[in-house]
Amino acid sequence: MSASQQPADSRELVLTRLIDAPREKVWRCWTEPELMKLWFVPKPWTIAGAQVDLRPGGKSSVIMRDPDGNEYPNHGLYLEVVPNEKLVFTDAFTDAWTPSQKPFFTGVLTFEDEGGKTRYTARALHWTDEDREAHEKMGFHEGWGKCAEQLEEVAKTL
Amino acid sequence: MSASQQPADSRELVLTRLIDAPREKVWRCWTEPELMKLWFVPKPWTIAGAQVDLRPGGKSSVIMRDPDGNEYPNHGLYLEVVPNEKLVFTDAFTDAWTPSQKPFFTGVLTFEDEGGKTRYTARALHWTDEDREAHEKMGFHEGWGKCAEQLEEVAKTL
């Protein structure tokens, strides 16, 4: 569960995990709102709402809630959707195709079969080195790592 | 040939023209490299090369050449491709999905039938007001307007 991969670019962060579930189930966890609610933020945070319009230009909206009940909406757009293989989204746009206040990162997720398990790789591509560094300090590896564990737990129940 | 349209956002520039050719031909001018070369920059500039990979995430590369022979490459990615209706591209990425050095604008083109002619609308959506203003000062309306006239000339020959 702890294989690593070198980023291809200084503006990139990468997390990879071997998840003990077939990639179809890992894909469902990433694309079905009811399943996303179960793993998308590190506990004890929760997801107050999730919407998915799964097509290039379709919106992704997830409302994260902290333990005190404060809500943090998270909006983005899907850029590329290859079922069970690849999912790309960005915060560079809000609606199709309204630029956001600030493009921070684009997420590129790949799901590869590895003997019935899933090689799950999440790459976060930033527009600047400063943003990559900020994301790292915000706890990218810890947060996305913890979420990957939660995702695996959910995928195993499907 | 000179209808106007109000931008929906202060970061947006809009140009619209009624082009005397059916939209299938206008679409071809925008998506076939050999045709793009004939109209894509205001003369006496020329196009030294054009490549089109027409799908979400596909690259668009156009090399513009000034009268002294200096070349200015122009790279972008297509985000949405609806044949004969809508074409969206951006300079926010170079390859799929490597962030560019600086996201400047996203182009949203629509092609609507208007009695056998084409209502051609080009919207340039910027991430900041400053970039919208810079694009305007660079001569957006004049440049894109001149190109729209050149495009019409080419479309009429098809």
Image: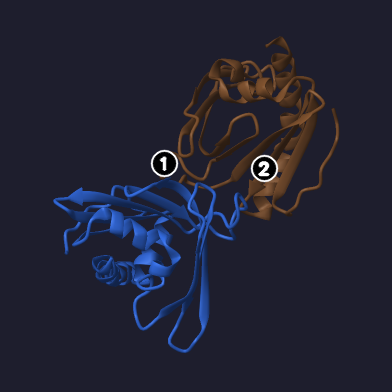
Chain colours: A brown, B blue
Indicate which disc residue A96 carries.
Answer: 1
In the image, B119 versus A129, the foreground residue is B119
Q: Is residue B143 above or below residue A16?
A: below
State the image coordinates of residue B32 (x, y, percent, origin top left). 42, 62
Query: Which one is earlier in the sequence, the residue at label 2 or at label 1?
Result: 1
| Separation of marks 2 and 1 at Cα, in angstroms | 21 Å
Q: Is residue A132 above or below residue A109?
A: below
Name the residue carrying label 2: A124
State the image coordinates of residue A149 (x, y, percent, origin top left). 76, 22
Q: Amino acid at mark 1?
A: Ala
Q: The residue tagged with tag 1: helix, strand or loop?
A: loop
Of all residues, the one furthest to the left in this rendering is: B115
How many residues crowd mark 1 within 10 Å: few (<14), some (14–19), many (20+)?
some
Label 1: chain letter? A
Image quadrant containing the C terminus of chain A: top right
Image quadrant containing the N terminus of chain A: top right
Q: Is residue A36 left or right of residue A22?
A: left
Q: Is residue A106 visible?
A: yes
Q: Is residue B137 above or below residue B82?
A: below
Q: Is residue A74 left or right of residue A98?
A: right
State the image coordinates of residue B122 (x, y, percent, origin top left). 31, 57
What residue appears at the point 77 percent right and 48 percent down from the top-left corner?
A: A7
